[in-house]
Amino acid sequence: MQNTRMAKILILHGPNLNMLGTREPAHYGHDRLEDINKQLIQQGMALGHSVICFQSNAEHQLIDRIQQVPQEKIDFIIINPAAFTHTSIALRDAFLAAEIPLIEVHLSNVFKRESFRQTSFFSDIAVGTIGGFGANSYRLALLAAHDHLEKSLAHA
């Protein structure tokens, strides 16, 4: 299913995700972030989209990146906010200001983990939330973003 317009999709990775593959593999799997990014870029190209990936351990860098989105004409954001899921009102406010649709992603099933991980500052402003499927959570989110963009174009 090829769309009629190439969209720009930004994938944001929050703190500690640069440690994927070695950090708590029972929760996060063995896939490295570099490999996940390569797969997402290829998947995006196959769907007819440009995928840009960015990771930071610093909240302000993620906020700065979100604030650049309107000037870059980004069409959609997929974010794994990691620990910022439960703590960052500042990131939430940046998303609200950018007014770009987003999907929240988690590698693990947060509802099978500690209770503090079950609260998100993003779920209610996201198109949807996908979690519990390891690296496949990102791939599923990219398919969902593609579908959302297709439906948006059809209704435009």
Image (tube, rainbow, N blue to C red):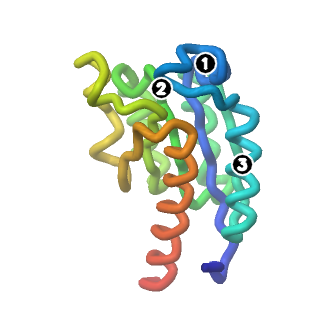
Disc 2 residue type (three-letter): Ala
Residue 89 placement: quadrant: top left
Residue 18 place in picture, x, y as percent: 67, 22
The quadrant of the rendering that contains the N terminus is bottom right
Residue under the image location 27 percent in, 45 percent down: 124
Residue under the image location 69 percent in, 29 percent down: 32
Residue under the image location 54 percent in, 45 percent down: 136
Q: Nearer the viewer, mark 1 or mark 2?
A: 2
> Does 39 sit above or below residue 2?
above
- Dot 2 corresponds to which residue? 82
Q: Earlier in the sequence, mark 3 or mark 1?
A: 3
Residue 83 place in picture, x, y as percent: 44, 20
CA–CA distance between discs 2 and 3? 20 Å
Residues 81 and 27: in front is 27
> Does 143 sit above or below residue 87?
below
**Neighbours of disc 3 within 10 Å: few (<14), some (14-19), many (20+):** some
Residue 88 placement: quadrant: top left
**Neighbours of disc 2 within 10 Å: few (<14), some (14-19), many (20+):** some
Disc 1 residue type (three-letter): Asn
Q: Would you say 38 lies left or right of 130 here?
A: right
- Dot 3 corresponds to which residue? 39
Q: Earlier in the sequence, mark 1 or mark 2?
A: 1
**Neighbours of disc 1 within 10 Å: few (<14), some (14-19), many (20+):** some
> Does 2 sit above or below residue 79?
below
Disc 3 residue type (three-letter): Gln
Q: Nearer the viewer, mark 3 or mark 1?
A: 3
Q: Are marks 2 and 3 in contact (CB under 8 Å)?
A: no
- Dot 1 corresponds to which residue? 57
